[in-house]
Image (cartoon, rainbow, N blue to C red):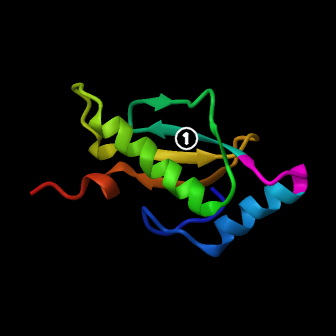
Amino acid sequence: MIWGGGVFDWGEQAGEYLAGLFKRWGTKMAHIFFHRSNDQNVVLDQSGSDVADMAEARACALRAIHSLLTTPGPEDWREWMLHVSDEEGEEIFSVAFSVVLGRPH
């Protein structure tokens, strides 16, 4: 992981990392992937998404989590994490699904 902290910690380092990808690839977009995992499963994103900046990467990550949470099914998403990675497989940041779910009462 490029940077760490809490379960939803957006730091300058992650934004700088994306900016470095744009510069290195000579583009204004970065292609990132939204993999998810829990203690027993790993699901890899095969298609990914293009993003223009860190704000868009964050928004896409939250939309991906929300989409999974609202899909009918038996899955208990409380222990899942979303891992946002670049094309080389380097993790840029991760988000716990519990950030969107909130704490159980």
| Mark 1 burial class by Cα count in 10 Å: few <14, some 14-19, many 20+ | many
Q: Which residue is mark 1?
A: 34
Pick the front one: 18 or 104: 18
Residue 105 colored in magenta in the image? no
Considering the numbered disc 1 on the image, is that residue within a helix, a strand or a loop? strand
Locate residue 72 relative to residue 60 in the image: left or right. Answer: left
Q: Quadrant of residue 31?
A: top right
Q: Position of residue 85 (x, y in %)?
A: 64, 46
Residue 25 picture location, percent across and down: 88, 49
Q: Is residue 39 left or right of residue 42?
A: left
What residue is at 90 percent from the left and 52 percent from the top?
26
Quick check: 63 above or below 70? below
Q: Quadrant of the N terminus?
A: bottom right
Residue 27, magenta (yes or no): yes
Q: Residue at x 62, y 61 (%)?
A: 54
The residue at 49%/29% (across/down) is 43
Write down the region rendered in magenta: 24-30
Report the residue at 85% width, 51% height from top. 27
Q: Amino acid at mark 1?
A: Phe
Q: Number of labelled discs?
A: 1
Q: Return the residue nearer the eye: 49 or 16.
A: 49
Q: Would you say 105 lies left or right of 71 here?
A: left
Furthest residue toward bottom:
12
Quadrant (top left/top right/bottom left/bottom right) for the C terminus: bottom left
